[in-house]
Image: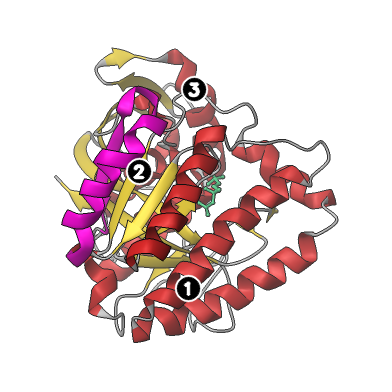
Amino acid sequence: MLRMNKDSFVFSKKSSKSFHTVWKAPSNIALVKYWGKYGVQLPKNPSISFTLSNCVTTTEVSFSPNDKKKYPTFEFYFNKNERKDFHPKINQFFEYILPYFPILEDHHMVISSINSFPHSSGIASSASAMAALALCVVDFEKQFHPELGEQDFFKKASFLARLGSGSASRSIKGPLTLWGKSPAFRDSSDLYAIPFDSGIHKIFKTYCDTILIVDKEKKQVSSSVGHKLMQEHPFAENRFDQANRNCEFLKSVLKTGDIERFIEITESEALTLHSMMMTSSPRYLLMKPNTLNIINRVWEYRFETNTPIGFTLDAGANVHLLYPAIESEKVITFIKSELLDYCQSGQFIQDRVGQGAKKM
Ligand code: PMV
């Protein structure tokens, strides 16, 4: 097993060859939120997420030797169109991962990505995109180092995906993953996410997530700016402590299947995330009036019908409705009849908990 720390899992460089691989990686939705980082993409608090099933990025990479250059070169295609505007983000990713992948340095890559969900839906695709790209890169390396075992392969992929986008570290495995050092989880680390699938109550293995698209526009304040604002945030330390405690509470809730407590923790996490935005300096709001309309209506519906449906929010205006699969018929009827008016162009995405990334 690889000892994953910053220096201990770099393989020596071997002679180059061409290689082609395709990986499909899912998006994820955090239940306990990561908000605030230190060093190079390391989290100030542990986070836990559901891995999704339908919101995925499929990425294909062709690697070919390019002896003349001492830096990886690439072309990038998104939904079959060449997209140079993605280059800065991908360049930064290669810059971060190169010390761990000397093998990449004299290669040219043709990278082609397709998202299953609309790019302009306001759903961040960086988690699934970075996870899929990281998996392609580790797969390439494995050709030269077949001794890389399955567990280490995915650990390294999570480590690399993290360097592209923190939450991407949680998009490798499923149905739930934890990223960040937590005293409640043995083997947890700030460097990569770990899956936890043993001891999870069966109700959470098929949980549903309906994503209500409230606003498709690019958000006004990016997550990287939001993470930075946590550095000087007056409530930061309390927030990090709270997230640590919530990871611990959620661990036992996920075992017992206590949905009431699950809803309490996840809704509180969502609203706390947005409170951090509202109380940072400068302050900002990513929720829209329809985000609040949906939350209020969901609360009324839960109270009136006793249906165990809760919500969570990403760093944006869209609402993720979380509920057990056995409730889905009833909940979808409710969504269609009462919530779609609050969605931009009536758009929503039906998803559920998934098992993690796959080689195609
Ligand atoms: O991975 P980033 O840097 O885009 O940050 C994601 C932060 C949240 O989505 C708001 C929370 C999370 O844990 O995914």
Residue 46 in view: yes
- Placement of the N terminus among the 4 image quadrants: bottom left
Q: Amino acid at mark 1?
A: Arg
* Quarter holding residue 183: bottom right
Q: Earlier in the sequence, mark 2 or mark 3?
A: 2
Residue 191 in view: no
Q: Amino acid at mark 3?
A: Glu
Question: What main secondary structure does the magenta stretch of the protein show?
Answer: helix
- Placement of the C terminus among the 4 image quadrants: top left
Give the side of residue 54 with respect to residue 313, left or right.
left
**Residue positioned 70% across, 66% down in the render:** 240
Distance from label 2 to label 3 (Cα)? Answer: 15 Å
Give the side of residue 117 with respect to residue 38, left or right.
left
Q: Nearer the viewer, residue 115 or 187?
A: 115
Q: Is residue 176 magenta?
A: no
Which residue is label 3 attached to?
217
* Quarter holding residue 19: top left
Residue numbers of the magenta segment: 326-353
What is the crowding at mark 1: few (fewer than 14 residues within 10 Å), some, or many (at least 20)? Answer: few
> Which disc is residue 211 wearing?
2
Image coords of residue 182 (percent x, y): 58, 77
Which element type, helix, strand or loop, lies under badge 3?
loop
- Up the image or down, 260 lies above or below 89; here it is below
Q: Earlier in the sequence, mark 1 or mark 3?
A: 1
* Quarter holding residue 287: top right
**Residue positioned 34% across, 81% down in the render:** 257
Which residue is label 1 attached to?
3
What is the crowding at mark 3: few (fewer than 14 residues within 10 Å), some, or many (at least 20)? Answer: few
Image coords of residue 314 (percent x, y): 50, 46
Q: Is residue 340 magenta?
A: yes
